[in-house]
Every structure is written in structure tokens, then in C-alpha cells.
Image: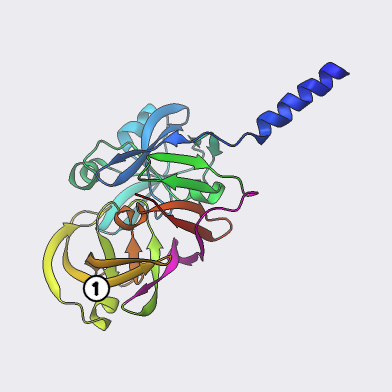
């Protein structure tokens, strides 16, 4: 009996120990973690704004992903062909994700042009829907956080917009909604409507666009952007001309300044300014 009690005590202690932080690789402003797709190991890009996980066809063959329904999908750069496949198992940080579907589509052009790194898989919002996640971009770490412990930082509500979670910010003295996009390693994006409303002058152009190909975007400068009580001044932003664009899209250029705790299931995010 005593041995059983001791064993139970060890088990309870093990369950109480918080998960250890795992390394988060940063390449060209984008976040990569180790993952398994149908048991096959790969490095995968994290993208909180991707509505579904994306798999490159070459890697899909290695991971025994086959079949699927042909479909045209639309990304920030335009439209492209894809296969919608069911029954794929994905593991990230010990989480066993079984998304309803994954999207098999060519990632080679995106990898070369924008990510600047061979990319087999893009893990989408399913990961953020499954658990509370704490991310320290500056410290290069990621960990599953307990829902029993209050996260550090300012709590902000998340609101869905076209399948992407958005948080409240202040721009030009006005409240606005900004997409929480850890897959954006480039500039902040601002909708054409908001850029025009704020009378922001175009200071240049730059190539951008994700899935679907390259697009040219105007560049403007936002004099003052407030995120979770932190001010960012003279923020370069690319103008998003998509009709469905939210007010803003915040990527790692802004989010790297915070310790991030994200909980899509609870529709909240906490942002704590990083020291140093």
C-alpha cells in the first residue's frame, strides 16, 4: 500500500510539473517548430492566421498522404490549386492534432520567394485552437501553458474575421482590429480603407503576397500604433488591397516585442512587453 501511495505521489508530481519550453527557430522573421505528420518528422512553420494546415506535395508523398478533393484556394497573393485531404495526424509539442482536413498545395514558390527556407508544412490555427500556448520570439522558445495559471501581460479579447483571430489596437487615435498573424514575418499590413481614412502618404512599393503568388503593395508609415499599451512609432506598413482585409495585420515585426500567451479556444491573448 505504501509503495502504491509513493508511486501515486510520483505520478501526481510528474503531472504537476509544467511542460518544458521547446526551442523555437526563427528564420527571416518566421517561426519554426519540430513536428510529425503521419509520424514523419519535419520542421514546420507556425502560422496562426492559416485557417488550415498546409502540406507540400513532395512531403505529402513521404508522409503517405494521398487522395483528396481538388479545389482552388485563395491566399493573400491570389488563387492556386490544392487537394483537400482528410485523416492526417499531426503532432506538435506533444499535442496530437487530428484536423478535419489539411490542404496539400505547392509551397516551393512561397518557400523560395518569401520564407527563404525549404518548407514542408505550415501548421495552421488548429494548433492554437487545441491549447494555450506561450511564445517568446526574442528568447526563441515555445511552451504549452497551463490554463490554471494567470498569464503575464495585458489580456486582450480575440474576434474572428474571415477565419483569422484579431485583437484590438489603437492607430491614429482610433480603435481598430488587427489580425494576430505569427505567419507574417514582414511589415504590418494596413487595409486600403484605413490607410485612406488616416490619409497616409505612399512612400514606396514592395513585393509581398503569400499563397497564390507575388503582389506589389504600396508602403505607408503609421505615425503611432498602440498595441497592449505599448507605443510603436513610425511603423512601416504595406497596404492590403484585398476587399476582405481587416484594419491591420500584425506579424512578428511587432509581436516579437512581447511575451505572447495565446488561447484561441478561450478567445483571448495576453501580451507582456519583453525586457531588453
Please tell me whether residue 115 belongs to the stretch shown in magenta.
no
Local crowd size for mark 1, using a 10 Å CA cut-off: few (<14), some (14–19), many (≥20): few
**Left or right placement of residue 107 versus residue 143 in this view:** left
- Hey, which quadrant is residue 49 in on the image? bottom left
Residue nearest the viewer, comparing 236 with 121: 236
Residue 242 can be seen in this image: no
Please tell me whether residue 164 belongs to the stretch shown in magenta.
yes
Q: Residue furthest front?
A: 276
Position in image of residue 252 (x %, y %): 32, 53
Q: Residue furthest right?
A: 1
Position in image of residue 194 (x %, y %): 29, 77
Q: Is residue 211 above or below residue 224?
A: above
Q: Is residue 111 above or below residue 215?
A: above
Q: Looking at the magenta stretch, what is its main secondary structure?
A: strand
Q: Is residue 177 above or below residue 33?
A: below
Q: Which residue is mark 1?
A: 223
Residue nearest the viewer, comparing 84 with 88: 88
**Residue positioned 45% across, 34% down in the render:** 22
Position in image of residue 202 (x %, y %): 14, 73
Amino acid at each position: 500500500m505504501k509503495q502504491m501511495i509513493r508511486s501515486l505521489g510520483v505520478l501526481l508530481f510528474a503531472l504537476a510539473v509544467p511542460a518544458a519550453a521547446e526551442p523555437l527557430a526563427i528564420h527571416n522573421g518566421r517561426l519554426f517548430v519540430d513536428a510529425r505528420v503521419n509520424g514523419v518528422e519535419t520542421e514546420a512553420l507556425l502560422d496562426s492566421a492559416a485557417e488550415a494546415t498546409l502540406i507540400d506535395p513532395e512531403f505529402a508523398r513521404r508522409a503517405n498522404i494521398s487522395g483528396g478533393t481538388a479545389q482552388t484556394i485563395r491566399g493573400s497573393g491570389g488563387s492556386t490549386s490544392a487537394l483537400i485531404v482528410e485523416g492526417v495526424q499531426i503532432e506538435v509539442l506533444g499535442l496530437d492534432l487530428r484536423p478535419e482536413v489539411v490542404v496539400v498545395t505547392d509551397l516551393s514558390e512561397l518557400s523560395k520567394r518569401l520564407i527563404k527556407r525549404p518548407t514542408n508544412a505550415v501548421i495552421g490555427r488548429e494548433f492554437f485552437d487545441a491549447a494555450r500556448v506561450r511564445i517568446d520570439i526574442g528568447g526563441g522558445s515555445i511552451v504549452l501553458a497551463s490554463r490554471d495559471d494567470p498569464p503575464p501581460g495585458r489580456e486582450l479579447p480575440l474576434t474572428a474575421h474571415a477565419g483569422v483571430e484579431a485583437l484590438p489596437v489603437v492607430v491614429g487615435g482610433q480603435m481598430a482590429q488587427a489580425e494576430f498573424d505569427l505567419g507574417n514575418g514582414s511589415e504590418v499590413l494596413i487595409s486600403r480603407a484605413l490607410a485612406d481614412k488616416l490619409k497616409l502618404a505612399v512612400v514606396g512599393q514592395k513585393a509581398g503576397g503569400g499563397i497564390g503568388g507575388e503582389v506589389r503593395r504600396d508602403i505607408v508609415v503609421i505615425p503611432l500604433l498602440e498595441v497592449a499599451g505599448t507605443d510603436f512609432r513610425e511603423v512601416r506598413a504595406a497596404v492590403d488591397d484585398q476587399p476582405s482585409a481587416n484594419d491591420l495585420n500584425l506579424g512578428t515585426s511587432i509581436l516579437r516585442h512581447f511575451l505572447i500567451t495565446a488561447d484561441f479556444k478561450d478567445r483571448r491573448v495576453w501580451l507582456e512587453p519583453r525586457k531588453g
